[in-house]
């Protein structure tokens, strides 16, 4: 989906009046989408930090239907390793 959205979307978001595709994070989301969203929020993680956050993310996603930005920020704050902000 991230590499080529037209594979999954028959129309562009702009063609229906939406500025962009809004990817919802949930239990089937992968590391790459999580990393992209954290980067958009201004947080750059090392591979080890991403692995730690992703582990906690999957545990949370098993309990919650959708994961929001504030949930992600909470996962970062519970991270014992230092997270760099752009």
Image (cartoon, grey):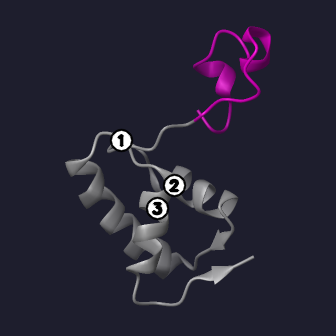
Q: CA distance from mark 1 to mark 3?
A: 15 Å
According to the picture, the residue beneath numbered tag 2 turns out to be: 69
Location of residue 47 in the rendering, given as x and y in whole percent from the top left corner: 53, 76
Q: Quadrant of residue 1?
A: top right
Determine whether the residue tagged by mark 3 lies in a helix, strand or loop.
helix
CA neighbours of label 2 inside 10 A, class few (<14), some (14 to 19), many (20+): few
Location of residue 5 in the rendering, given as x and y in whole percent from the top left corner: 66, 27
- Marks 2/1 in contact by CB < 8 Å: the verdict is no
Q: CA distance from mark 2 to mark 1?
A: 17 Å
- Marks 1/3 in contact by CB < 8 Å: the verdict is no
Q: Quadrant of residue 44?
A: bottom right
Label at residue 72: 3
Q: Main secondary structure of the magenta part?
A: loop
Q: CA distance from mark 3 to mark 2?
A: 5 Å
Location of residue 82 in the rendering, given as x and y in whole percent from the top left corner: 53, 90
Q: Is the residue 58 above or below the residue 75 in the image? A: above
Q: Quadrant of the C terminus?
A: bottom right
According to the picture, the residue beneath numbered tag 1 turns out to be: 28
């Amino acid at each position: 989906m991230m590499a080529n959205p037209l594979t999954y979307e028959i129309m562009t978001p702009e063609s229906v009046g939406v500025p962009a595709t809004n990817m919802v994070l949930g239990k089937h989301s992968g590391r790459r989408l999580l990393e992209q969203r954290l980067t958009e929020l201004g947080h750059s993680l090392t591979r080890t930090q991403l692995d730690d956050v992703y582990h906690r993310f999957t545990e949370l996603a098993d309990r919650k239907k959708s994961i929001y930005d504030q949930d992600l920020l909470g996962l970062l704050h519970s991270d014992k390793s230092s997270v760099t902000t752009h």
